[in-house]
Image (spheres, rainbow, N blue to C red):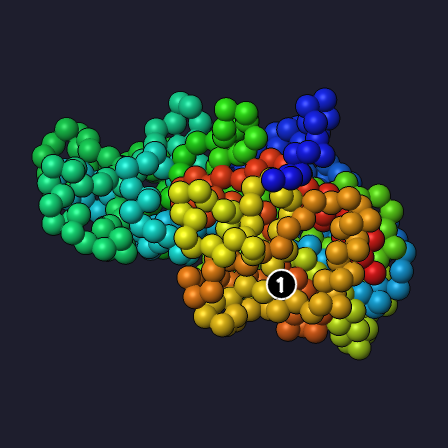
Amino acid sequence: MKTAWDKYPQDKRNVVMDFAEGYKTYLSNSKTEREATKEAIALARMAGFKRLDEYESLKAGDKVYVNNRDKGLCLFVIGKDDITKGMNILGAHIDSPRLDLKQHPLYEDQGLALFDTHYYGGVKKYQWVAHPMSLHGVVIKKDGTKVDLKIGDKDEDPVVGISDLLIHLSADQMKKTGANVVEGEDLNVLVGSIPANGEEKDENVKKYILDLLKEQYGIEEDDFISAEIEVVPSGKARDYGLDRSMVMGYGHDDRICAYTSLMALLDVKELERTACCILADKEEVGSQGATGMQSRFFENAIADIMDKMGVYSELGLRHLLSNSYMLSSDVSAAYDPNYPSVNEMKNTAFFGKGICFNKYTGSRGKGGCNDANPEFIAKLRKVMDDNEVAFQTAELGKVDQGGGGTIAYILANLDMEVIDAGIAVQNMHACYEVASKVDIYEAYRAYMAFIKDMR
Ligand code: MN
Ligand code: MN
């Protein structure tokens, strides 16, 4: 089987391996959509990007970003062409499956203090127990002060976690189906066991946790009402495989496409067509809300960009959108030798075969999908071949096995040509997902080719 690795014999492999180092750092520092946004802004500013309000006016060559409530981002490199002739857009999402603390999370049960959670996104709940977990998020106090929380990822930090039942007492549990082995309401995070003042009074263990939070972060119990705290797997992204050919980490879905799209935009030189990179929130729960892709935020940002270029009109904005092209990037399912039966082998994504294009996603008869137009795919193939990018095409599993959705249809509904693209992963939505380094690098090269040459 010919793979993209063939393009990088041992003496040329560094470029692939080095790119993955940058990605591992980004992924390790980006456990939430807020952290992914913050890291992306830091990288963008190093590459010369500025906030929209830092520009008096915009012209070709300018690099600008618009921040969506610290949970999403649109970045632009202004091209030389008339912007109403359309943009080349890269889009990915930066939220990942996890467990969110409820608004009244903290309670005590028989001398143990726990946080109650509600899971976010599609998770096999049994995968999220008996793992070291960390707490990441923000608490906004009544006066508006923001407290950043990040506990459980430094070596010296404590970790927290959710217990699983010991095998010795699992006779009943083991008879349950996978969906119910661990129930959603039982995803409670153990955070403490010492009573305040060493006294055996009611809720004294809970009190001690509250005392610690007050002392270390200035947080009161009521402050959880205006907080967003996520329970995520602890630990850094790491090399996977004895040959170090893969990366294992939490949140590949979809920070892997976010990082590669972002880096392509950051590294690009002069452009004819304006290029845009969207990093969106809320994909895992349906893309609704102000920070999801269905929000008007994206159109508003473009209107502001056009305004600063001195070319805003409602009709111009409509033309810009309908003349744009987009790679809507999200992770694809990589062939897994342990579970071959879920695939139809001619239309399956494999590790090492490069970026993956999905004409359609959806489920049960393409339901809910964006079905990319072949005229657009033909142009895209040519750009990939001209730039010697390794790519494959696939669908998510065989017909009626399952399926999934992305943000592709939302942009396509704005009247533009969109195709699903992305990087294949194993263990999708588990605590630790796996991807191939050469696919990561080829995705970056594909995004670069697309924003440079697609017209
Ligand atoms: Mn995804
Ligand atoms: Mn997902």
Q: Quadrant of residue 338?
A: top left
Q: Residue at x 11, y 45 (%)?
A: 171
| Front residue (pair 102, 383) | 383
Q: Quadrant of residue 43?
A: top right
| Front residue (pair 360, 150) | 360
Q: Is mark 1 within 8 Å of ligand 1?
A: no
Q: Which residue is mark 1?
A: 359
Q: Quadrant of residue 128?
A: top left
Q: Position of residue 440 (x, y in %)?
A: 62, 40
On the picture, is 405 further left or further right than 39? left
Badge 1 local density, few (<14 within 10 Å), some, or many (20+)? some
Q: Residue at x 11, y 37 (%)?
A: 168
SS category of the residue bearing label 1: loop
On the picture, is 64 further left or further right than 159? right
Q: Residue at x 44, y 36 (%)?
A: 150
Q: Residue at x 28, y 37 (%)?
A: 130
Quadrant of the snapshot with the N terminus: top right
What number of labels is visible? Answer: 1
The amino acid type of the residue labelled 1 equals Lys
| Position above or below: 57 against 410 | above
Q: Position of residue 381 (x, y in %)?
A: 75, 56
| Front residue (pair 322, 65) | 322
Quadrant of the snapshot with the C terminus: bottom right
Which residue ends up furthest to the bottom in the rendered image?
A: 315
Q: Position of residue 274 (x, y in %)?
A: 81, 57
